[in-house]
Amino acid sequence: MSVWVWRIPTVMLREECHSMDLLNRPLRTALRVLCLIGLTGMAAVAQAGTFTGNNLTIDIGSNGALGPISYNSGDGVAVNYVLAGGYAFSVGVNGSSAATQFGDPANPFNFTLTDTGSGNTLSALLQGNFSGLDISRTVTFDTNSSFLAITTTFTNTTSATLNNIAFLDSLNPDPGVDQGLSNPFGTTNDVVSALGLNNLVTAGDIGGARSIGLGTVGAGAFASVLGAFPGLNPYDYLSTVDPDGAIDDLSLNLAYGLGALDAGQSVSRTTFVAFGTTPGAVQSTFAAATVPEPASTLGLLVLGASGWAARRKKKN
């Protein structure tokens, strides 16, 4: 059966795997294993660079997709959070979209990768384009960091206004697989308000030892927990979906609706991927997040400790 999955054309494999969301949970889990086998077989052809710190190790594909991502929480054991097929980045312009996914060698944004790290900062620059937009993605983290920052910049290179620009960072965390947990794909999933309304989404393994979160600072972002596999169309995720801590095999999504961009203009947004032993630890990591810049002093985001302590969870 694994051979059959391996031989499915790439586009068909992505579509079939995403259709699993319509199935009941036991069947969906079984089919997800088969999809992982197929996507793992394709993953090797996409790897471009590996960036290793004391806590984090991140592979970045030649198509700009992240994965695997391993994190050592301090117990000396590095656990992979992102299996093949478990991460996707998608962009929409004027209602049309494209996506790059870990395990799929397709490179719709024509990304090239450059190692821009220096000293204790690991950094990679991805440069590409889509429908009149220049796309720049900088992935940075410190050697001792428990988070990474992904800054995405779009520049309109046309002579006209580009409308309805959106993008999505989406991942399905599976830290329970490396740990051999009885429910390896299940996580507790929640959307919380940290530095803004519903702008941080977290997932923790059933064993209570490994957690992850996607977050951002500023308006125009939507955090959600939705879909067994990462999303491939940002327009489908421009709303908040919060399971309030429910246990399931679902993806964490952070979508940005950027609106219109005039000719020659640029816009940037930063997604933080934070790690910790528990969802609460992830929130603390996110609160203390800094943005590493190669060849410069690390700059702390404006995060007041007293303001963080006063924040509480809010729902729409």
Image (cartoon, helix red, strand yellow):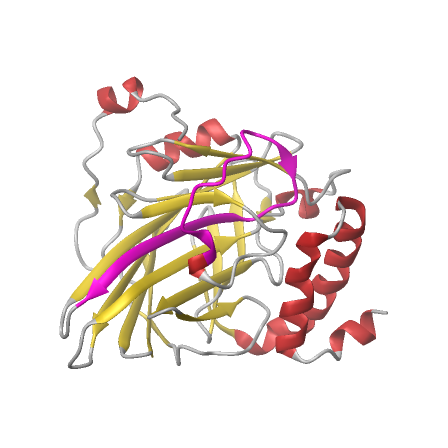
Which residue is drawn at the image coordinates 45% and 52% (left, top)?
237
| Magenta highlight on residue 138 | no
Q: Is residue 40 visible?
A: no
Q: How many marks?
A: 0
Q: Quadrant of residue 137?
A: bottom left
Q: Residue furthest right?
A: 1
Does residue 202 sit above or below 34 in this rendering? above
Compare residues 199 and 272 and report the one nearer the observer.
199
- Between 138 and 8, the residue placed more toward the observer is 8
Residue 256 forms part of the magenta stretch? yes
| Residue 206 visible somewhere in the drawing | yes
Q: Tell me the quarter of the image containing the C terminus.
A: top left
Q: Which sits in the foreground, 120 or 79?
A: 79
Q: Position of residue 235 (x, y in %)?
A: 42, 59
Quick check: 210 above or below 9?
above
Could you tell whether 289 is left or right of 63 in the image?
A: left
The quadrant of the picture occupied by the N terminus is: bottom right
The x and y percentages for residue 271 are: 35, 50
Magenta stretch: give its range: 236-261
Residue 282, horizontal then vertical, whole percent:
44, 34
Residue 278 in percent (x, y) is at 52, 30
